[in-house]
Amino acid sequence: MSTSGDFDCIVIGAGVQGSFTAYQLAKKNKKTLLLEQVRHEPSHFDQVSLCSTVTVLHYSLLIIDYKFIECIENVTKEEILKSLTSLLISFFEDFFSRCRLKFPLISTFRQTGLLFMGPEKSENHQNIKDTLQTNKIPMLVLTHDIFSQHIPNVNLAKGDGALVDTTAGVLFADRTLKAVQGQFQKLGGVIRDNEKVTDIKPGPVVRVSTSVGVYHAKSLVITAGPWANKLLANTGLQLPLEVVKINVCYWKEKVPGSYSMEQRFPCFIQTECLESKVDIYGLPSNEYPGLMKVCYHMGSKTDPDQRDLQKDRSDIEILQHYITRCFPGLIPEPAIVESCMYTLTPDHHFVLDYHPAYSNIVIGAGFSGHGFKFGPIIGKLLCELSLGEVPSYDLSPFHIRRFQSKTNSAL
């Protein structure tokens, strides 16, 4: 059955960035269409490791995403932190209130704590410690002689330090996504999933063709993740994006519950270790009872439409060695291996910009495996760009022109 329609804005890609963008547009009374190529039917509790309330920003902005802060110009890191903290917290409080939820809820967020492990004398570990102290985040410093009393069933390597952000926890991503899409629809927004975009015709009014119909809009926002370049090809633009497949591994507990969320076992991040310089992270068992999620924070290049053809397991071998050495309570063979994809830019910073030839096409791409936590802010910024407003923050570090020598254009 063919469909059609005219809108103020079309957003392609109903992940967290696109959904929050559509929500912000609908809040400003813009007739908005949100397109998604697949039907969203999560098979289990998708979750991401974040910190609660204010701490989500202290941690994610200044530790995992320290480079994000370094890219913001004309203001200090402290000013950005304070401003973004206020923005995100007020947003979440308002948002979950609108959803008739009390924030945080056990059904949406679970406080577990977050354990950082890494070479104690490294710059990275010291930055983490300084950030937690500077922002007065409740923290435990665990020395080797008391480590096992607080964190059982984990071996802390010689020379490693251990810090625990006690306010951290797990945010259930699928439930958050469902909530924001629900609010978008309550504001009059239209979601059409299971509709693959087949063509984009730029112009004063953008025409978007899908497998089901044709739509027109004054502006277009592309937040299509790994498929960004495939869509941008219709507009004569290719960005230097690399798509990698991430093996998402779940490891069976030898004693059920020993690493479980119910036992308040913490999330963890290993910043450097004997096996790898790439971060290793883990979440307590919950999604699959008796299985702990431990993953390598990088993957191998893939085609998003053929990612199952990518069979590289070198990261799993690294994890097996790491788990054997540091997590003796896990069987060092993954019980389940799922997959996700990261879309990387050369500098691992986001792309938040107008199309270089069409000012009514806005691009949000290249979130490089660390974009989820910024969903509310990214949505606000992309909404502002699509409406021709001055963005709330200086976005020059995220402009396309920084890749001038690596950007292909047929325009």
Image: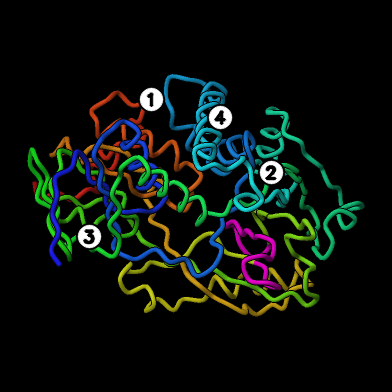
Circle number at residue 392: 1
Which residue lies at the image location 15% right of the left edge and 43% below the top edge? 217
- Asked if labels 4 and 2 touch by Cβ distance under 8 angstroms, the answer is no
Mark 2 and mark 3 residues within 8 Å of each other at the beta carbon: no
Q: Is residue 78 left or right of residue 201?
A: right
Q: Amino acid at mark 1?
A: Ser
Q: Which residue is mark 2?
A: 125
The image position of residue 159, as x and y in percent, is: 79, 53
Provide residue 128's location: percent of width, then percent of height. Answer: 67, 39
Type of amino acid under label 3: Lys
Q: Helix, strand, or loop for circle 4?
A: helix
Task: Check disc 3 and report the residue beneath it.
Answer: 230
Q: Residues within 10 Å of mark 1 (few under 14, many from 20)?
A: few
Q: Is residue 364 left or right of residue 341?
A: left
Residue 40's quadrant in the figure? bottom left
Three-letter amino acid code at the position of disc 4: Thr
Label 4 sits on residue: 85
Q: Circle 1 — which element?
A: loop
- Give the CA separation, mark 2 to mark 3: 39 Å
